[in-house]
Image (cartoon, helix red, strand yellow):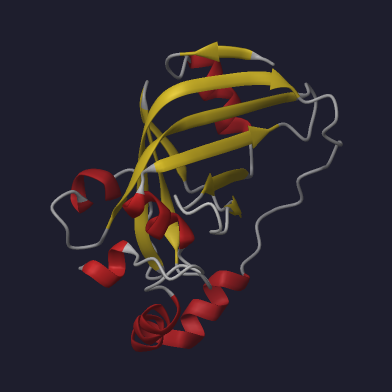
Amino acid sequence: MGKFHESISGAHQDFIQKQHIFFVATAPLNGNGHVNLSPKGLDCFRIIGHNKVAYMDLISSGNETSAHTLENGRITFMFCSFENTPNILRLYGKGFTVLPGSDAWESNAKYFNIYPSTRQIIVAEIDLVQTSCGFGVPLYSYEGERNIHFEWADKKGPQGLEDYVKENNLKSLDGLPTAIALK
């Protein structure tokens, strides 16, 4: 079952900072709604305090995390080691979306290298940390980050990115509004 902790320790922070990928999961309250699980990379995750984390969210094909956290706040992050020691670390908490131009933007954006394609920052207050073995997680070697997103965003340009967000990021798969839709 693993070990449970009330906050992010120094050892947890060291483990998180060594991982090149993490996963974020959210779900709507409706039992027939779709659970969302997304991989994230590009050095976009930050630990802001012992019980607070954030990640810079880039424009992409959907915006489930924003919709789900707007509806109910539930969010889980998972980090797992694909190299060396087989460990898994989960952060459970309540998340919310911070949009560019909002009152909370500057205080959260300062932790990141904001790109033109940064859609929002997802912030979470963590109430439970779980560590467990990762004996079943295979070994993989990290080769590097992909540049595809940034090439795509450059081709779109500022107006193209804005149009893309309006077309693809205002509602979840299940029709829930995102924070962008409500601004």
Q: Is 104 situated left or right of 38 in this image?
A: left
From this view, report whether residue 61 is shown above or below residue 89: below
**Within the image, what quadrant is residue 54 found in?**
top left
Query: Which of 28/84 is in front?
Result: 28
Q: How many labels does the image show?
A: 0
**Within the image, what quadrant is residue 34 found in?**
bottom right
From this view, report whether residue 63 is shown above or below residue 10: below
In percent of width and height, residue 42 lies at 56, 53
**Within the image, what quadrant is residue 89 found in?**
top right
Could you tell me which residue is drawn at 63 percent across and 45 percent down?
Answer: 21
In percent of width and height, residue 10 lies at 48, 15
Could you tell me which residue is drawn at 44 percent across and 50 percent down?
Answer: 29
Query: Which of 21/30 is in front?
Result: 30
In percent of width and height, residue 35 lies at 58, 53
Query: Which of 105/151 is in front?
Result: 105
Q: Is 147 situated left or right of 82 in this image?
A: left
From this view, report whether residue 93 is shown above or below residue 131: below
Query: Which of 53/178 is in front?
Result: 178
- Image quadrant where one finds the N terminus: top right
Could you tell me which residue is drawn at 61 percent across and 67 percent down?
Answer: 147
Q: Is 4 situated left or right of 100 in this image?
A: right
Could you tell me which residue is drawn at 78 percent across and 21 percent down?
Answer: 85
- Image quadrant where one finds the C terminus: bottom left
Q: Which residue lies furthest to the left in this view?
A: 103
In percent of width and height, residue 25 lies at 55, 46
